[in-house]
Amino acid sequence: MSNDLIQVIIKHLPPSASSLRLLDVNGEVGRALLKLRADLAIEAVSGQASQWQVADSSVDAIVACNYVLNDAFLTVALRSLRPGGRLIIANSRGTVTAEIGRRLEATGYVRILVEAILEDGILLRGEKPHTTADTLLRIQQTAEYDANQLTLQQYKGRYIHLLICQTPNKPVWRLEPDEVIRWQVVGIRRGNQTMLLAFSSLPKAVALMQPAVLAGKIVNVNKVAKFDKALNWELPVLLNPTLNDIEHEQIVLIDIDPDLAELPDE
């Protein structure tokens, strides 16, 4: 399997909870994807789509390489995806036509993308419509896949997400020669103990951050960054707190080295 095709698929995976549930059609790409994304929970499926034993609205993404579309497959894939989930097909050879987009649209997909990739390839992407137009509610629905108030030992994922206050708040290309970026992560002081606030996924972080900002509890946060859970955290970590967990606690900012962060997802 071409590594270039794998990279294309990785780029188009949807936002998810700490573990992205993925169907690997014909079992061709899962192993390669897992080398690049340790947070994937992959199930291989094959044969006629109508025979798949997959619950409705149960997966975040369905991926395939060098796959020939048929209407039955498109229908079953759409039914299997959760709202906001994506069908992603990367073919090493193919021609972009309006007909492909019309077939996806007629089946019920939205946010459709049909584009040329690599030298002679084609990417097809369609998304299952959300059940609400409320962006915050969408984030909360995705965040609910992960439990609240976990310990790092209970959490099986590889990464945690931290709320960051970056100063100066500007992209790298706008920095003056003598300016240095400083990162501070959000924590709480509970009694005599300082704790880091951490989250198992980006949606989980945003689901807490938005109401906390609106309530005036958290201010000046302008970034969410991803870190390896296995780093030597000197402070205790409060994983997946709710607004109720922190509303009576003092918010503190703790310096952290930006170089410790993982590269952001596409």
Image (spheres, rainbow, N blue to C red):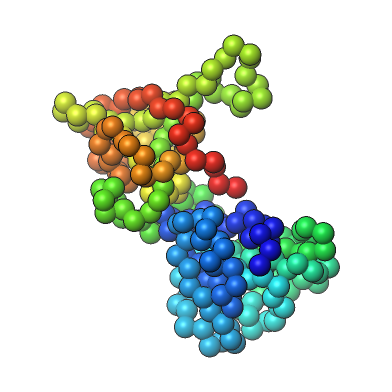
List the single residue furthest toward the top. Answer: 178
Q: Residue at x 36, y 30 (%)?
A: 186
Identify the image quadrant of residue 93. Answer: bottom right
Q: Which quarter shows the N terminus? A: bottom right
**Place of residue 133 in the rendered image (x, y in percent of width and height, measured from the top left):** 54, 54
**Place of residue 88 in the rendered image (x, y in percent of width and height, measured from the top left):** 64, 65
The answer to whether residue 176 is visible is: yes
Identify the image quadrant of residue 197. Answer: top left
* Left or right: where 98 falls relative to 7: right
The answer to whether residue 165 is visible is: no
**Place of residue 190 in the rendered image (x, y in percent of width and height, measured from the top left):** 20, 31
Q: Residue at x 63, y 13 (%)?
A: 177
Task: Give the total of numbered labels.
Answer: 0
When the figure is inspected, residue 65 is found, relative to residue 151, above or below; the finding is below
When the figure is inspected, residue 168 is found, relative to residue 79, above or below; the finding is above
Q: Residue at x 66, y 59 (%)?
A: 3
Q: Residue at x 60, y 72 (%)?
A: 28
Residue sitting nearer the eye, 119 or 1: 1
